[in-house]
Image (cartoon, grey):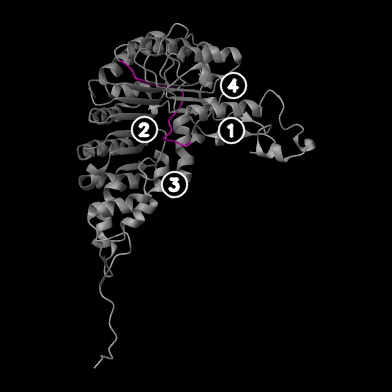
Amino acid sequence: MASNVSQQPPTNHTAPSGTQNAVFRSDANILTIPDNILEIIVMQDHNRDYRCWERPYAYRHTRQLSTTCRRFRKILLPVIYHSVFLIGSRKATEAFLDLMPVYGSFCHQLAIRLPGRGVEFCSLADAMRRQRKNLSNLEVLELVIQLNGDSVTGESPSSQLQSWSTDILRKPCALTMVDQELRSWKALANALDGVKELRLHGFTLADAANGFQGAVLSSVRDLFMQLAAPKTFQTSTAKQLRTAFPNVVGITLPAAWCPNPAWIRHAFSGWQLQRINVGHVTDSWPSSTHGADDHAPHQGSSCKWAESLQVLLELHSSSLTSLALSTPMCAELDLANMVFPHLTSLTLRYIEFDDETVETHLKPFLPSPLQQLHIDDCSGLPESFSTWLDPALGRWPNLKTLSLKGIHTQQGPGDDLWEEADEEEREGWDHDDGEGWQSQSRIALEGYCDQRGVEFDGNDWEWFEGFG
């Protein structure tokens, strides 16, 4: 007799077509997945390449996900502590340092602010020094010493950022450390070996150099100094830096400094620099914290920065692989007799161009094996520059990326809106007004880049007439 009981669906069912040998379980859930696979899944929405100032916002979702269960927390804790940006209250900084015996090994990048004077500064600096041994994998340290600052409390991350980072990056404090503060700073500075990239903000060059006196931080490869400069650069300061950082290959200096050529020679003649960056603060910080006004010397016509920069390039032109000059001082450089045989990345910012200066500034780099060329936020770049990318000329055959941020253009022949518009609408769209590139030059440049396989983002064009 046939059974009246209906058959229950099997727990395991056959796989869809094309997935032979696969078995699907109706009782399976995400927590049955091995940790290594689960890590790949939960990391899909996470990017470790966030710029430093973006991390407090971008990591919010990661922190929320880590509260789901113990397994998620175990997987995500190394992610949460990989890159830490402490811009908040003193209490938050102290709480972070207290956790370092447990989580310190997870931290690879740290931006930390040490504000205040006297005991307030010294206690934080001493706490940072004590916990340094627990930060065993720290590679990048962004250290903000703000003697004229106090703890930020009760503010959102965005208001905190606005309240102190802009002033620190643009105008480092010229206050000097007293003996007690200098002792704490020196003890901390001597504990920083192992860090590969060191970024110093907010205090004076003299105090920074005094802190590193007697130290040898052989691990540091990149040194960033957004520091208050003295009126007179002392040779002793140059020697202290050179001794403390024997293996530096990358240097970032503010354009507001006015070092003399002799100081440059004392400071940098012992190194073989591969990366030089003058004037551009850093992409780690919001662009609102630096502008064209911050990329020229502040001390007046007596400043010899251009002459000093000339010396710096002469010392290291043969070893440079990356050069970024973000200052109008470039107009005073004489590069005609320099050769940059290994330069693969060139960035020029805040320069006033014309037909003659394009030749002056760029011709020395024609023999260089450039892969990246950035001419950003520069005025007067002539339309004739488009022909530099003509494949027939064979210039920079290895070029992969071209950036012309801030260049204006207009609609004209070859644009969709132009072709669709009547003659009356077109009037005034495409004309030589001395400011924007005409469409034919822009389209020619984009065409050359396309032929050569050079990445060029057309969205970087700034359009006139409300189009684009």
The magenta span reads 272-286
Image location (x, y in percent) of residue 413: 68, 31
Q: Which residue is mark 4?
A: 381
Image location (x, y in percent) of residue 13: 27, 70
- Label number found at residue 145: 2
Q: CA distance from mark 3 to mark 4?
A: 38 Å
Whether residue 437 is visible to the viewer of this picture, yes or no, is: no
Residue at image coords 31%, 34%: 141
Q: CA distance from mark 3 to mark 1?
A: 31 Å
Task: Look at label 1 and name its amino acid.
Answer: Trp
Q: CA distance from mark 4 to mark 1?
A: 13 Å
Quick check: is 385 in the magenta stretch?
Answer: no
In front: label 3 or label 4:
4
Q: Which residue is mark 1?
A: 461
Image location (x, y in percent) of residue 334: 49, 8
Tag 2 near tag 4, CB within 8 Å: no
Task: Look at label 4 and name its amino acid.
Answer: Leu
Task: Look at label 3 and name its amino acid.
Answer: Pro
